[in-house]
Image (cartoon, helix red, strand yellow):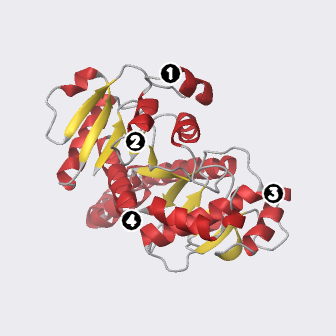
């Protein structure tokens, strides 16, 4: 399997991305990685890795579509074009907007899909909950949310192995008729879509496993995601502060250190690594902008599994079987 990794975009710098790739190669003996970035990264390369040199990349401050059209040598653009040759997927910690624009303008959408959706995994038990859209589309309509529900359901069946994923619509209340015009219309369309729709779910239920797939627009989804990240960070910090407050609590912390470490790992975004942009003809995975080497390695794990499960093929077949749900 040959994949591409964008060395630009992470706050930690290209060298940190390279280290994550090295970790992934150890875990996946059959993997080859093309690292797109500064030519200096080509020093001391391990086997099964090559450098695709470029000094150009797209920042979060640039207008995505304009930058993708103008910067032919930008790392994300080069990656998308290389996927048309002999690479099977691309992971980047760079601009979400640039990734979306690249997917739409270069890689192109799957037949029947109007927009792509950023899909994340929430660390619920006994299996993750899939949330989409997590920030790719700030403005959507009810038809798009229905497409997101269909794609999320297929992804959950194919990658997580759930036979009949429960799909919920993120709303301000669970009762039918709640919400704004968008959620009310979306509720009606999702009810009649070829998926197991359970109705509205509230943000407070995102970690309670009331459903397997949560559908929302990118504006709402990104706010929910950032709120969850901030809350997790606060809980970790506050818990550490309280446990270190006295001798008795320090002893308790020592006795519970394994449980506390497991809790920290569950709330740590680096454990998830990266999220797919569903609806594009090739696998595009978005890593967190603060990704370290561990996060990149875990993101590559998710990309490899996505390819191995032929998730794009499963999406294509499902959309062919349900053309009325498409564009």
Mark 2 crowd level (few <14, some 14–19, many ≥20, 10 Å Cα): some
Of callouts 2 and 1, which one flags the residue occurring earlier in the amino acid sequence? 1
x then y, percent, for residue 46: 14, 38
In this rendering, does residue 265 appear at all? no
Q: Where is residue 298? Give x, y as percent.
A: 33, 52
Residue 115 picture location, percent across and down: 64, 49
> Along the polypeptide, which appears first: circle 2 or circle 4?
2
In which quadrant of the rendered view does residue 212 lie?
Answer: bottom right
What secondary structure is marked by label 2? loop
Classify 86 as above or below 41: below
Above or below, 312 relative to 94: below
Is mark 1 in CB contact (under 8 Å) with mark 3?
Answer: no
Q: Secondary structure at mark 1?
A: loop
Q: Which residue is mark 4?
A: 309
The residue that disc 3 covers is 182
Q: Tell me the CA gap for discs 2 and 3.
A: 36 Å
Answer left or right for 280 relative to 170. Answer: left
On the image, which quarter does residue 27 sit in? bottom left
């Amino acid at each position: 399997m040959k994949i591409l990794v964008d060395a630009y975009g992470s706050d930690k710098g290209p060298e940190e991305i390279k280290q994550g790739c090295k970790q992934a190669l150890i875990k996946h003996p059959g993997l080859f990685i093309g690292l797109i970035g500064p030519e200096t990264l080509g020093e001391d390369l391990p086997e099964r890795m090559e450098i695709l040199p470029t000094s150009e990349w797209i920042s979060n401050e640039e207008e995505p579509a304009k930058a993708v059209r103008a910067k032919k040598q930008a790392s994300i653009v080069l990656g998308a074009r290389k996927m048309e040759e002999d690479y099977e997927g691309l992971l980047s910690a760079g601009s979400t907007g640039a990734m979306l624009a690249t997917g739409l303008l270069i890689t192109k959408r799957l037949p029947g899909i109007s927009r792509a959706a950023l899909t994340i995994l929430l660390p619920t038990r006994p299996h993750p909950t899939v949330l989409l859209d997590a920030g790719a589309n700030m403005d959507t309509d009810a038809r798009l949310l229905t497409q997101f529900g269909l794609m999320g359901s297929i992804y959950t069946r194919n990658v997580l192995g759930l036979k009949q994923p429960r799909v919920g619509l993120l709303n301000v209340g669970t009762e039918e008729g709640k919400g704004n015009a968008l959620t009310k219309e979306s509720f009606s369309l999702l009810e009649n879509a070829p998926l197991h729709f359970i109705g509205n779910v509230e943000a407070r239920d995102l970690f309670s496993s009331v459903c397997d797939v949560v559908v929302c627009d990118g504006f709402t989804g990104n706010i929910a995601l950032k709120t969850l990240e901030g809350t997790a960070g606060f809980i970790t910090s506050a818990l550490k502060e309280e446990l270190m407050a006295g001798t008795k609590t320090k002893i308790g912390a020592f006795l519970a250190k394994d449980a506390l470490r497991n809790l920290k790992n569950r709330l740590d975004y680096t454990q998830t690594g990266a999220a797919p942009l569903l609806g594009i003809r090739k696998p595009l995975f978005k890593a967190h902008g603060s990704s370290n080497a561990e996060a990149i390695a875990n993101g590559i794990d998710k990309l490899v599994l996505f390819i191995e499960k032929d998730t794009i093929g499963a999406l294509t077949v499902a959309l062919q079987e349900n053309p009325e749900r498409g564009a």
